[in-house]
Amino acid sequence: MVSKNSRKTDESFGSSALLEWKVSIAPMPEVVSVIDPLIKILGGTDNEVEMYARKNYRNGELQSLRALGFEITSMPHLNQTSENVRKVKTVQVLMNSVFTQNPLFQEPIDSVAARMIHIGAEALYGAGRCQFEALKKVCLDIVAWFGDHLDKQMVILESPLGNCVPVAILRTLAERANLLHEIKVWNAPRNDRAHKGYTIEDSANAIKSEIGESSIVVYIDDAITGTRFVKCFDALNKVMKNRVLPIALLFQDASLASSQFNSLEKRTTKAKTTFGYQNTLVKIPALPVFKLDNGPPFKWDSPVIWGESDFTAGKRKVNLVFNLIELMSFVIEDLSEGGECIGLLETAWRQNTEGRQFRFAPGLTQNSINHLKNKVEWQGCLHSLSAMGKTKYPNDFTGNIDSLNQAELVERCEWLRDTFVEQAKNKILEHEAWFLWNAFYDTFSVMVPLEKFKPARDHIYSSCALRFNDTIRSYHEKLIDIIVNS
């Protein structure tokens, strides 16, 4: 996943020419041609373009960057809103692949990048001003209420990533008001069925042990569909009865069914009586539509302006081992069924680095993978991998790690590879096990970005919310500064 050593070379084939090209270093003139117009959108200079072009970009990375850059630079400048949108999209692309080697790896802050990142944060605020102003008012009301109840400590639950921005605003305003408060990070899984394993309620019990008995727990989050909010609140309220103050944020463009609204209203109305606080169910205005061309107007991808990107939250949710197991399941299942992944894999295997070309009889790749998948008893194999992953990385499973460096990243990928091959060897020959692994790895390598893969929603593991490095996190911090000082 992170190096060419993640696969084993097949002696009869060698190495894929396509994959070798994707990981090779791109020529600097090509890099300049791609990043120059993007950096200039954020006010960068020629010298700054040259500085960032010196970084080693792999061809595959530059290919993705070129496609994203073309989309952005093709946007006409129609008005201030369209310009804000363009700057927001630009800064998010640059933060992911240009301003830092890896957004999650800690490194000294880059003041040049931070300057341009702040321009992007200002543009995001301009694009979503109506929602940010409404959110600030919600947080001011909470702080004012706690100011009248100084005998109670406020514990604010951060449930990444959706409520990171509301929590950051609330924390800043509480600090300014000298209120006694504490932030607790709650990385809850999505699973609510005990027979499947680790549940939201289990996670709620774990966070309860960190919270004082006399504290009032503030759970503020968006309620786009309402389902997740209700599940989380119910789990918290069950283990901390009448101590959890829910603040549900409703959005006019969200797909909230009447049954879910009734569930939310029932819980938030009861909380009004319990706490004497009235603003437990708050309507946030819809984002304005915007024009990017002479066609119909566009809407944001999400009805929540701060829900657009993990950069806005200042953290990224990952669970490398268990996400990769799910991804492996998706890829091998798709390959065995003759899905879209077959075309990706056969493209990767069409030519090796020595120039030899290969053709595939119709159905051969699919049938070979399906045969091996059945022989290894695929679902049982995945279940064993997950169980061993939980034992090997218990803190990953419960979401209790706060950083991940390059060595730890490589170690987890290599553990998964080696463990899978050892498991598979119990049912098939070693070279067949490596064939199955290489089929997954090579497909994964050409399908990035993972547009078609979506992790299971009700998974039993928790994702870890890892802070971005200081350079990238300055986007989040600048945005919070603008909101609270506006």
Image (tube, rainbow, N blue to C red):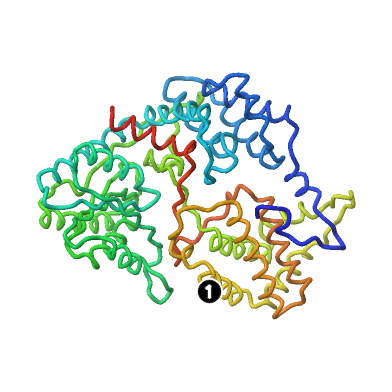
Q: Is residue 328 left or right of residue 402?
A: right
Name the one closer to the observer, 205 or 82.
205
* Amino acid type at mark 1: Ala
In x, y percent, where is residue 134?
26, 36
Q: Which residue is pictured at 66% across the width and 65% down the height?
A: 417
Residue 136 appears at what percent x and percent y? 26, 36
> Given the current orientation, which residue lies at the most extreme bottom position?
426
Q: Quarter holding the N terminus?
A: bottom right
Residue at left 33%, top 58%?
Answer: 227
Residue 70 falls in which quadrant of the image? Answer: top right
Up-down relation of residue 41 to residue 287 (above or below) = above
Residue linked to disc 1 = 387
Nearest the eye: 446 or 10:
10
36 relative to 1, above or below: above
Q: Is residue 296 visible?
A: no
How many numbered circles does the render carry?
1
Identify the residue at the far front of this view: 108
User: Is residue 254 visible from the viewing direction of this image?
Assistant: yes
Instruction: Provide residue 184's location: percent of width, then percent of height.
Output: 31, 54
* Residue at the (65%, 51%) spot, across then down: 447
Circle 1 residues within 10 Å: few <14, some 14–19, many ≥20: few
Rendered residue at 52%/26% (across/down): 112
Residue 294 drawn above or below residue 192 = above
Front residue of 445/364: it is 445
Query: Dividing the image into 4 quarters, which one contains the C terminus?
Result: top left
